[in-house]
Image (tube, rainbow, N blue to C red):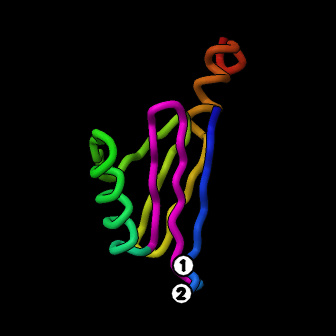
Amino acid sequence: MTRILVSRNGEDSSSFIVVLVYVEDIMIASNNDATLEQLKFLLCSEFKIKDLDSTRFFLGLEIARSSKEMTVCQRKYAHNLSEDACIMGC
């Protein structure tokens, strides 16, 4: 079962944090470094976690970042699915 939590800071409506949980995998994204570090510290105090820093792929999602935005797509997943189904070039 997949769970997602999105939260905005009440004081700063432009600040957000997203937590995606799938079995024992967690991905956290935020546009506020201080909030992100606070959550990671809290998680470390309760659980054994490993911070993989920036990731490019997570559960079939391709993640691209720039200084202004983050985009998520399933191009690689769709490509692999097409290959598995023998739709492309078989």
Q: Of helix, strand and loop, which one carries label 2?
A: loop
Give coordinates of residue 51: x percent, y percent: 28, 47
The residue sitting at the front extreme is 46
**Residue bearing the label numbered 2:** 12
The image quarter containing residue 52 is top left
Q: Which amino acid, mark 1?
A: Asn
Q: Which amino acid, mark 2?
A: Asp
In the rendered image, the quadrant that contains the C terminus is top right
Which residue is drawn at the image coordinates 52% and 54% (left, top)? 19
Find out whether residue 25 is within the magenta segment: yes
Give coordinates of residue 78: x percent, y percent: 65, 32
Tag of residue 23:
none
In the rendered image, the quadrant that contains the N terminus is top right
Q: Nearer the viewer, residue 36 or 56?
A: 36
**Residue bearing the label numbered 1:** 9
Q: Which residues are magenta?
A: 14-31
Q: Of helix, strand and loop, which one carries label 1?
A: loop
Give coordinates of residue 69: x percent, y percent: 50, 69
Q: CA distance from mark 1 to mark 2?
A: 5 Å
The residue sitting at the bottom extreme is 11
Q: Nearer the viewer, residue 22 or 66?
A: 22
- Tell me if 61 is positioned left or right of 24 in this view: right
